[in-house]
Image: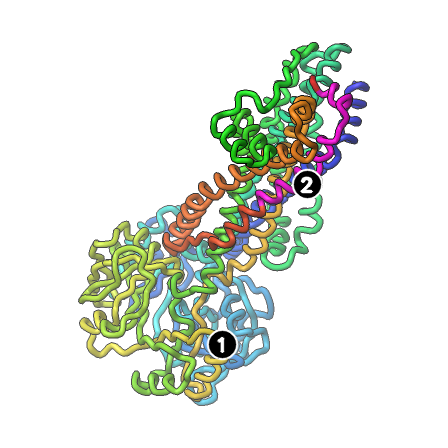
Amino acid sequence: MRATLRWAHADLRTHRGEALFIVLATAGVVASLLLAAALFGYATNPWQRVFTQSHGAHVWIHAGPTADTRRLADMDGVQSVAGPYPTAVTTVESRGTRASVELRAAAEPPATGRPLLTSGRWLDPAQTDGVVLESSLARALWAEPGDILTLPGPTRTLTVLGVADSAEPRYGPGERPGLVWALTPLVRSTVGHTGQVIGLRLTDPGDTDYAVQRAVTLLGARAVTDVAPWQQARAEAQGDNRLLGQVLGLFGLGALIAAGLAMHGAIGTRIRGHLRDISVLKAIGFTPSQVVRIFLLQHVAYALLGAVLATSLTQVLGGRIPGRLGDAVTVWQGAPGHTAALVSVPVLAVLFIAATTGLAAWRAGRVPPVPGLRAAAPPGDRLPRLARRALGLRIPAGLVLGWHKVFTRRPRSLATAARLALPLLLIVVAMSAWTTIDRFDTRPEEMGLASTLTVRPDESLGEPDVKTLMARNPDITGVHAGVQVAALVPGQTGTIALRGLGTRKDPYPFSVVEGRPARGPDEAVAGQGLLDLLDVRVGDWVRMTVGPQPQILHIVGRSIEPANGGRVISTPLDTLRENDPELRPTLYRLQLRPGADPHRVAAALTADAQGRFDVHPVSNPADGLSPLRAVVAGLIVVLALIGLIELLTAIGGMVREGERDLLALKAIGLAPRQITAITVTATACTALAAVLTGTAVGLPLAHWLIDAQGRSSGIGAGIAQGPPAALLALFVAAAVLGAAALAALPAARAARLRPADTLSAGG
């Protein structure tokens, strides 16, 4: 054991840089996996915590004011109910920001679906104008306890008493009203669309769809206006955090495999370079198992050190990372499974690295005590015809022999290029993810975001008045009138968004990636989420119910639809007016000139309309993915570090082989500069093959992965965007030139060795 430790110590002193890189690469991989675990936990735990603590309802059913919703409590499978509560939909304003809200009468916190106060206090019967806001609505209004909200009408105000978390679907501007709890007299006296809501907590959450179907049948389809199952609320709460976790987990696993293969190559190269040392170890009495343990334990120790370093840094500094990533780590550290993940992830990473290095270490145990002599044949012998012709054309001998060196050791060169190609491939995928996120910002019209602002005017304004006011603003280049209503899907198990937008003469520019735009009567385009929900395809007809009116539409295209999880079907406003000629637009989508400031345009519109416009920016999924840029940048650094390890290993192997051939190369008249060029050219050719392979495989893989994520999120395939050609060319050039630069110095040193110094390298 003492001799083993002494040999390991001497080897560490000789290869400090390589050991440091292995430790740092392992630390980066383990840190990526731990952050992925944190984001996965953050994606589900907050909503699950609120749902569990509030004894949440599995489905919330909104119905008309005359529906007998109390009958639902007697249905089989219903464990408890929340309500029914009278509701009134209206609009509130705070600090110039408007929001559509649902006032819900609840004098006492209910046992089922109980709001969890985060600040302030609950409703007070002595303060009749007091309300409690759901937290997402409070953030949208920038409202806190003590603030005053304004209701439509003469000087009607509300006082915010508290802010509470709820497991119900969160507030979405223009899509879903925010939730406000108020006293019953206040709700009944509010002018607006009235109704009632009841929450059902089921004995089996998996029977939610069946329970909804029975509830709608019991109440009547015309009485039900909206259905919100728990799966929808959970999906909205998870949102972009799940995507962050998936991306980080994918790259973390890919980087783990790349690191394992790099270490496998490092041990293999080290064994080939230390055949004489291994023979000496065996000659002095080391058994094959002892030799295997020397190499295996040495690299496992590097991996273990890196894993401990990553775990410590993540635990101590992870919560201080700015933005959502730091919040995720903080929440994850308080989760029940935090300790288990904190231990199991590093342990599994180290075991995986040990498994990938075991085979190469096993090869060390098979080295004979007296290795066979290696004949040093001049590289100029048996040159292929192409190489001889290149030399005849006076191409520098160093370039030709370097290229020939790569192709004469084809199996080893292919293995090195394949190991180096893996991290480069993942870098290409990471760059594609970055470019796709930027595409939402730079070319939103291609990502289903043709409009920038949504305007909802007061009912007192007619369509001509609205367009006249908008025509005064030179920053507005397009105005499309529309409506959006909730519709019951076939089977009546949930609701979707039915949108009438634009007209046949002035169609809205949807981003149609499959099929064609809707041009004729009863034609529509749909998002991926709706196609998956209804299990239909482009070309099918679908039937839905809007209040008492059925609507049958022919899906002629699939559009990229970022809103509502893609559960949206869109048709020209003309189609909806055929069923209801009195239908008036309730919203307007605005297109702005390039470079226009949406906030300034919104403020100008509100001022021109004297407060009769409710203006909101169209939500962009890229806003929630902003932390992903920093994550992708960090992953690129980790992958580049792993690629650097593999490249240094390859350079070390080529330099050692060059030392063995030094006498032969000098015998045929090559100068040290030409000998250096052989190693540099061989390294550059290997890097070129790896980066071309990584790019060729990485681009289609990135498109497939990003589009698969788009399909699973409901946005739909067609959002993937590869890096610009100039960036890819720069990436290829940087990889090849960087590899050549790294090889230049060690190759030059080896070329200047004295002949006597190379005699000991023939083992």
Horizontally, is 588 left or right of 36 in the view? Answer: left
- Residue 605: image x %, image y %? 43, 83
Which residues make up the magenta segment? 735-761
Residue 472 or 41: which is nearer the viewer? 472
Say how the picture is coloured: rainbow
Asked if the residue at tag 1 contacts the one at tag 2, i.e. Cβ–Cβ closer than 8 Å, the answer is no
User: Which corner quadrant of the image does residue 719 belong to?
Assistant: bottom left
Residue 257 appears anywhere in the view: no
- Residue 242: image x %, image y %? 49, 51
Q: Main secondary structure of the magenta part?
A: helix
What's the distance in space between the residues labelled 2 and 1, CA to CA?
Answer: 44 Å
* Residue at numbered disc 1: 597
- Residue 380: image x %, image y %? 58, 24
* Residue at numbered disc 2: 24
Residue at 57%, 28% (x, y): give it. 405
Q: Measured along the vertical axis of the image, is residue 411 above or below residue 606?
A: above
Residue 465 or 59: which is nearer the viewer? 465
Residue 517 appears anywhere in the view: yes
